[in-house]
Amino acid sequence: MVVVLVPTVFSVILLLPWLHHLAINVICIGVSILGAYETAHFFSERGLPTNSGIFPVAGGLLPLVTYFEVSGILPSGILIPSLVTAIGVILVREVMISKHDEFPKVLPRIASSITVLVYPGLFLTYLVRFSSLPSAGISLTVFLLIVFVNDILAYLVGSLLGKGTRGFLAVSPNKSIVGFIGGMTGSVLFAYLSWLVFPEVFAGKLVVAIAVGLGVGFLTIVGDLIESAMKRSSNLKDSGAVIPGRGGVLDSIDSILFASPLCFYLLSIAGGGR
């Protein structure tokens, strides 16, 4: 399944660039909604009260608001007031409870609802923001490949050479220091190679490419560990069963989530894609 999905994603990015990359952004919106429901499932598995109705959809639609912003349909900066409004609704909703025995559930329900609202939707808005870069398709492809290279090399190097350095993090005992170094090295090297082939992505600046490689490499690993912590807390092996042989949606995008904001800002501030 993964062998089919990965080439399909890159084909959509590079071959269907019309309307601010509408095709890949529609996929991003769908993934965001599914990921929000998987996040809500983490809380329900722990027996914590959740608003599992509209809030996963609202969180999942944050990339849609961002797409409208990038496309000029909605004014620039509309995402923040939209997010503040949604959080306000979550808080005000707790005022409306009518039973005294509901009060102990207020704090965990607020926490779960806000988490579902922003994870993964808020982070995925930055994938949509790549569409605002002049060389959007190439920039997004380079970013995703840096993430994938990190994942692959961290696994291979860790499996082959890292057995003696495993267990340094309780949240993911099979992760190794050697695998971490292998993934980071792969990210930096691939960013350097991308700079040689597509210098415009990094505004022609090698220092930007190295910063992207280091930053994306590190946050790729952090994103994976964060989702591992959430799964361990809810006693789940996978976030879902949407992707055969892979698990849930979050299992496939966890590495991307934390790295995408940093990469977008580095490229945008540096003037990448121009």
Image: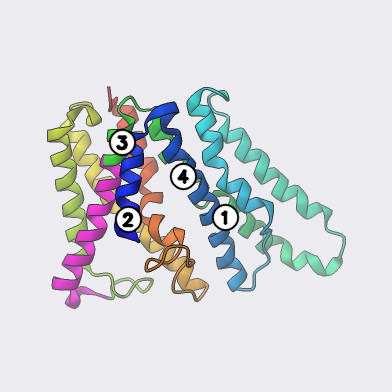
User: Mark 1 to mark 4: distance in Å?
Assistant: 18 Å
Question: How far across and down, in percent of the image, does residue 258 sit?
Answer: 39, 50
Query: How many other residues sit within 10 Å of disc 1, few (<14), some (14-19) or many (≥20)?
Result: some
Residue occupying image coordinates x 77% and y 55%: 94
Residue 60, placed above or below residue 238: above
**Residue 32 in picture, x, y percent from top left:** 51, 49
User: Residue at point 22% right, 45% down?
Assistant: 213
Image x and y of residue 69, in percent: 52, 28
Quick check: 77 left or right of 178? right
Circle 3 packing at 10 Å, graded few (<14), some (14-19), many (20+), is some
Amino acid type at image mark 1: Thr
Amino acid type of the residue tagged 3 in the rendering: Leu
| Residue position for label 1 | 115
Pointer 4 local density, CA inside 10 Å: few below 14, some 14–19, many at least 20: many
Residue located beneath label 4 in the image: 28
Please state the extent of the stretch shown in magenta in the rendering.
142-166
Check disc 3 and report its element: helix, strand or loop: helix
Name the residue located 41 percent from the left edge and 32 percent from the top edge: 21
Q: CA distance from mark 4 to mark 2?
A: 17 Å
Question: Mark 1 vs mark 4: which is more N-terminal?
Answer: 4
Hey, which quadrant is residue 212 in on the image?
A: top left
